[in-house]
Amino acid sequence: MKILGIETSCDETAAALLEINQIGFKVVNNVVLSQTKIHKKYGGIVPEVAARAHVESIIPVIKAALTVNSKLQFSQPDLIAVTKGPGLITSLSVGAQAAKTLSYVWNIPVVGVNHLEGHLWSFLLNQKSTIQNRLPAVAYKLPAIALIVSGGHTELILVEGFGKYKLIGQTLDDAAGEAFDKVAKMLSLGYPGGPVIAHFAKRGDPEKIKFPRPMLDSADFNFSFSGLKTAVKYYLAKVVPQGGFSQAFINDVCASFQAAVIEVLTAKTIKAAEKFKIKSVILGGGVSANENLTQNLKLKVQKLGIDFYYPEKWLTGDNASIIALAGYFNFKKNYPAQGSGKNNWQTLTTEANLQLV
Ligand code: KG4
Ligand code: ZN
């Protein structure tokens, strides 16, 4: 079965072709066209600009994803999976319209996918668990606690199976990735902030500045990063050095800020893991590209004697392979008897499954 994934929830125009058989998954093509350069001059994403860029790129990106040899022969898929939300509605609409149109023209089903569900299961596409190796069914242990950390979300979810989720905690204000982006902006480091802060943090001292650890000891599983962001702002205003920030100073701010975020994310996740007696911890979302986070969390999870699953770096940010995979699970769950035959799918799946959220 071949699945075309389409992802346009934010500022990446992405399409992927995923092949699935009895043994496992294979990412045939994973095409991501980032709009980062376009939005950089605004210091963040401008929804209207993002939607226009998606309109320009969506067809070339889908074509690239469907091209399986250099002769530009298209491989027609059996199923289309498209992000239905959460995200910027104007951006989502572009992907959804493209998906519905192709579904109509090819007479194949289309399913809507929750973006966070894509991030949650992204670890399954790691090379070691793909087609050459083991069955997805035996590759992971449930129930799990999933920590989803992206630019828009920070959530702790109790996972009992595909579609069986319980939200146990979330950020009350800024998402973790958003805090990285805003602190980077304060330091004039550009957008997105996560990768550049992680880069400078490597050379800084994480204990140099004692930034607060918001809600570290709260009785619930919620997060709050807005106060931490403000603490960085006040710190910068107070100690602003003559002649601007030195590189060493920036490195220390980045390292100390990053340490605060990671400590809270890790502590809350471990607390949830202990409380819910789960068999594994899953990490996903753009912030899971942060190696300090993955390594720190991995150590603590392993101490509990349970498994830790996280995506390889190429799967952490927004991409359509993870949407294709979650779409496949969604399709199997909701339409188990239908197989992948070319019936009159549009009315069945489009109406029921593709409400943008
Ligand atoms: O999942 P994602 O690509 O998009 C959303 O769904 O929001 O996440 C993007 C977020 C951005 O805030 C970006 O700064 C952050 O992920 N990010 C990182 C790193 N790489 C990307 N945050 C911390 N460390 C990183 N290495
Ligand atoms: Zn995302």
Image (cartoon, helix red, strand yellow):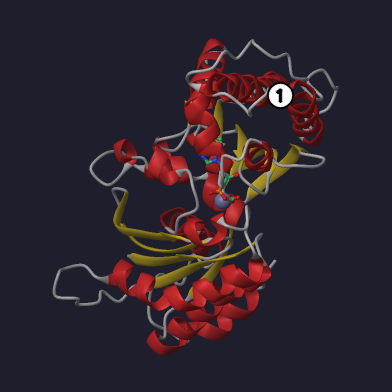
Residue 55, position as x, y percentages in the image: 50, 78
User: Looking at the image, is 232 positioned above or below residue 354?
Assistant: above
Taking the image as shown, residue 202 lies to the left or right of residue 229, namely left
Nearer to me, 87 or 277: 87
The residue identified by callout 1 is 268
> Residue 139, can we see it?
yes
Q: Which amino acid does label 1 sit on?
A: Lys
Nearer to me, 26 or 225: 225
Q: What is the quadrant of residue 176 in the picture?
A: top right
> Residue 284, can we see it?
no
Quarter of the picture holding the C terminus: bottom right
Q: What is the quadrant of residue 57 in the picture?
A: bottom left
Find ligand 1 in the image and state its quadrant.
top right
Residue 201, position as x, y percentages in the image: 53, 23
Tell me which residue sits at (50%, 45%) in the image: 121
User: Looking at the image, is 85 positioned above or below residue 58?
Assistant: above
Q: Is mark 1 on a helix, strand or loop?
A: helix
Tell me which residue sits at (59%, 18%) in the image: 252
